[in-house]
Amino acid sequence: MIVYWILLLVTAFAAYFIGSMSTLVIASNFIFRRNLARLGEGGVWLSNFRRVYGVWGFVKLLLTELVKDLLPILLGGLLLGIKGHAEVGRAFAGFCLVLGRLYPAIYDFRGSHATVCLIVSALLLDSSMGLAIAALVAAVGWFTRYLSLATMVGALVMVIASLLLIDDNLTMTLALFTAGLVLIRHIPSISRLLNGREEKLSFEEDITYKFDEKL
């Protein structure tokens, strides 16, 4: 029993810590060797990043995020797999990963949408669930330009799919907690969406970052 708790604690710490790490900072320091934050914020950042680095740049950034999110979940499965609960380990690591992404202690508990974390967590629990979430998040994000709305739709799909596809009760509960965490974090976004104040993804170029210090 003590070994089991130690494995859980190691999984929780690793997943939360890695989830708290900023992909933007990692990519700036180790992939692009430039301060990407200087490109702007929100949708403007995406537009400027696309213009400067193109499709291949997006691929490298996405791969950075995917590797960062995959590692703790695979680790959780490996560690809890020692006790014969690999699926529970992946689900628990996914929950801690999303928690770190949404509420990172090292950034004063101010996190991002955890969209990719949610998709990766779902994929490693059930591939069909993960693919469905990824497809719907992409579709909603593309047609509405609201990343928050797309993420909430993904979380709702995870709730429904978990109830239908996951047989193990503990794994299902952890998946529901993960989706619920995302939905709770996005409650303020619902109000902004209803009032038309939520920020949209923008693909229009912004050049104000050029007046900041050099990239």
Image: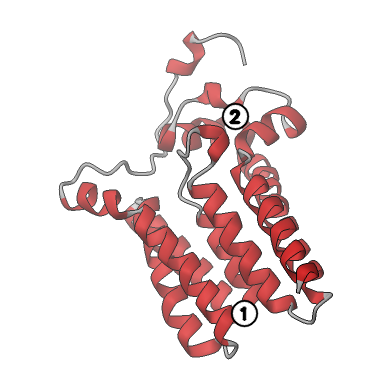
| Secondary structure category for the residue under label 2 | helix
Establish if 77 lies above or below 65: below
Packing grade of label 2 (10 A; few <14, some 14-19, many >=20) is: few
* Residue depth check, mark 2 versus mark 1: number of the one nearer the observer: 1
Q: Position of residue 161 (x, y in %)?
A: 48, 82
The front one of 140 and 84 is 84
**Where residue 54 sits in the image (x, y, percent)?**
62, 38
Q: Secondary structure at mark 1?
A: loop
In this orientation, which residue lies closer to the viewer: 157 or 31?
157
Colouring: secondary structure
Find residue 15 and name its label: none
- Up-down: is 9 above or below 176? above
* Residue 144, horizontal then vertical, whole percent: 32, 55
Q: Is residue 9 above or below residue 132?
A: above
Which image quarter holds the N terminus?
A: bottom right
* Residue at the spot 55% in from the left edge and 26% down from the top edge: 37
Residue at the far left in the pictured view: 195
Reading the image, the residue beneath label 1 is 126
Query: What is the three-letter code of the residue carrying label 2?
Result: Val
Q: Residue at x 40, y 51 (%)?
A: 147
Query: Is residue 197 visible from the viewing direction of this image?
Result: yes
Which residue, given by chain and number where applicable, does mark 2 sit on?
52
- Count the marks: how many? 2
> Depth check: 49 or 185 in front?
185
Mark 2 vs 1, N-terminal side? 2
> In this rendering, would 31 be left or right of 210?
right
